[in-house]
Structure formats: C-alpha cells, structure tokens
Image: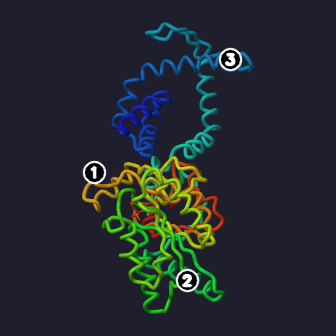
Amino acid sequence: MRSVAVGLSIGLFCAMLPIPLQMLIAAVCCFIGRGNIPIAIAACWVSNPFTQILLMLFQERVGAKIRGILDLGWLDFIDIDGTVPFIKEDLNLANFAVGVGATAIFLGIMAYPIIFCFYTIVPKKYLQGVAILKRKIPVISLTTTPMKKIPTEVFEDKQAAVNKLAAETAELIRSNDAVAKITVLGLATGSSPIDYYKSLIHLHNTDGLSFQNVITFNLDEYAGLDREHPESYWHFMHQNLFNHIDIKPENINLPSGMIGEAEIPAHCAQYEQDIKDAGGIDLQILGIGRTGHIGFNEPGSPKDSLTRAIELNPITREDAAPSFGGIDKVPTTAITMGCGTILAAKRIVLMAWGTGKASIVNEAVTGPVNDIVSASYLQDHPNASFYIDKEAAGDLE
Ligand code: F6R
C-alpha cells in the first residue's frame, strides 16, 4: 500500500517535469523511495496532458515577466502568439522559451540543495534503495556518508566483540578490587548479551575473575511475572550468569514484576536510590530493540526519565511472542530503568548483532537525537560505544 502511494505521488510530481526526463526521474525516485514503478509511470502518463498544459502556462507567465525585465530582443523572431488547445488560453512562444530556459537554470542551481534536503528529511529506512544502487554502481554517490555520532566498533563477528567487552569488564573489576572499591554493573537481558555472559563465566572459571565485589542492577523486568517464571528476567539472569559465578545474592538487583500498582512509584524510587547508594553504575550493558528502545524505554520516553512502569510497544511484544508461546501471553507492561538512569552510567556499551538490527543501529548512531529512538540519546553520552558485528553495521556503510 505504501509503495503504491509513493509511486502515485512520484508519478504525479514527475508529470510536471520536462517530458524527456519524466520516466527516468520517476523510475529513479521510485527505486530510491521504494515506490511502485508501474504505478508511477501510469500516473505520470495519465496526468501528463493536464500537468504539461499547466506547466506550459506557468512557464509562459514566468517567461513574460522575465522578458518584461530583461531586454531579450534577439528572441523577437519567435514572438508568435497562439492559443493552447482545450483550455483556450493565450500563449506566446518567445515567453514560453524564456520560461523553459529559466526553469532549467533554476533546477540546475537548486539541484544540490533539493537533494541535500531530501536525504536529510527522509528517514534512512526509506532510502535503502540508495545503498543497493551504490553497491551496484560504485561510481554514483547519491548520499553523503552517514556521520557516526556514537563511537562504533564493528567486529568481524559477535565472539570477537563479546571477548573484548568481557576483557574490559574484567579489567574494570580487577582495577576496582585493587583499591578495595565495589564495581557496579548495569545488566541487560535478551539474546544480545548471552555470549558476553558466557565470556564472563569463562573468565571466572579459567582466569579467576571474581564477582565478590560486584553489585548488579538489571535494566528491567516484566510486570506480572514472579521470579520463578521461565520468562522472567530474574530467571534469565540466574540461568545465564548469576548461577555460574561467585556473586553474592544480596548484591543482585532487579526491579520486581510482582509489585502492586499502588506500590510501583515507591518501588521505582527505591531502585533509583539503591543505584545511587551503590555509587552509580560503572558500566552499563545494553541491547537495542527494534523500536530503538534501551531497557524498555519505548518511543516517547523522555531523556531524563527514571525507573518507572511502562507500556510495552506492540513491536516489542511481537518480538517476545515466540519465547512466551504467543503474543497473548506476553505481558503488556514492565518496570524499566529510565533513559536518565541509563545515561547517568559512567560507561555504556550497547551490543547489536545481525541484519535485523542494521536499520535501527543506523538510526541510533547517525540519526537525530529524539524520543522516537531512545538509543539516540546515547549520542549525548561522553563515554558510550556500540559494539556490533558486520551484519548489524550493514546500513552504516
Ligand atoms: C533487556 C532489554 C532490552 C533488550 C532489547 C534487545 O533487558 O532491556 O532493551 O536489550 O530488547 O533484545 P535482544 O537482545 O533480545 O534483541
């Protein structure tokens, strides 16, 4: 439906261009904007007689104005008056010729600003055709290289990335241990950090990395799930990390999914206070959802938001549906650290793997900072990085 609408608008617009260029420009615009090319061409041709007449009249009027200002006597040899068929409007050939020339010069001068605005305003996901075009015809460079506004390390594969992050974590814990300081880790659930947790467990087992002086705070928990529920984040963290390392149970913190509605604000305020009392988060681990969420900060989450209850976006629930055995079983709300809570961490690393994350990673790293993609707030953090694999970097070029 979207491609038909895009094709239709492109076709109607291109019908106003000079005839020899119409089809070519309509096809290129459709390819770039993912519009339906046959619809665009049909719309172009059907509307052509009307749009061309309108364009002709417009150009003739502009030409007349220009001839009124400039002395273009050498054009007098085509100073011939006629009448436009169907609408019976007067048209002067010399005026028309001047109007066509002026339009061409104007479009020539404006081409770069128009293309620049087009690529700035239109969201990158609608410009996927450009990437394909650039790959196929490398000589043509239609876009400017996206500006990476968050330091982004692209790794050969996921394992290389998690090894580096685990080594960075071990270094942090050991250097704090050396000065008898507690290390505070902010942890995430989901598929992205699983291999990172495996690497930490490996370092614990083979390299003596101890978590005795580590306090953890998890980003979020589903509302309505008790700790033993197989899909609760409490359960996930114990299965994937806590049961395999020497962390003290009293140092493990997750929001509770079983708090009564009236108690939620106090529970969230206490969670914030507990983070502050621990000295703030030294290293915050993040994944990114298809909605651009970090934690469960869905689109619309303010930059300074704190731990709170949040309604899950339908896309997030859809993504969780397979593990819950159906979307009906996925909770509709959760408790999440806020964007402000996350941004207060001293160091932040966001992990993303696979082509499924490529488009949202690109939006977060190169797009505008706004509440539509809460991960974009990381652009304003002084020490945030993205660790991603080649596939997740696919749209970054
Ligand atoms: C998990 C969390 C979420 C996930 C995100 C990505 O605690 O807060 O933000 O990090 O939904 O999930 P995966 O890694 O499963 O793609």
Determine whether, in the image, residue 45 is placed left or right of residue 292: left
Picture coordinates of residue 235 (x, y %)?
Answer: 36, 70
Please, which residue is most extreme toward the left here?
325
Task: Look at mark 3 in the image and give the residue it sits on.
Answer: 65
Q: Look at mark 1 in the image and give the residue it sits on.
A: 328
In the picture, the disc for residue 119 is none
Report crowding for label 3: few under 14, some 14 to 19, many 20 or more residues within 10 A (C-alpha).
some
Badge 1 marks a residue whose secondary structure is helix
- Identify whether 166 is placed above or below 349: below
Q: Is residue 154 above or below residue 140?
A: below
Q: Residues within 10 Å of mark 2 (few under 14, many from 20)?
A: some
Q: Tag 2, which secondary structure?
A: loop
**Real-space Cα separation, disc 1 to disc 3, in angstroms:** 66 Å
Query: Along the polypeptide, which appears first: circle 3 or circle 2?
Result: 3
Comes first in the chain, label 1 or label 3: 3
Residue 79 appears at what percent x and percent y? 62, 13
Where is ligand 1, by quadrant?
bottom left
Residue 53: image x %, image y %? 48, 18
| Residue 213, disc | 2
Q: Amino acid at mark 1?
A: Asp
Residue flagged by tag 2: what amino acid is it?
Asn
- The numbered mark, 1 or 2, whose residue comes first in the sequence reads 2
Q: Nearer the viewer, mark 3 or mark 2?
A: 2
Q: Amino acid at mark 3?
A: Lys
Q: Determine whether 184 is above or below 292 in the image.
A: below
Kindly indicate the quadrant of the structure image that contains residue 234. Answer: bottom left
Q: Residue at x 63, y 32 (%)?
A: 106
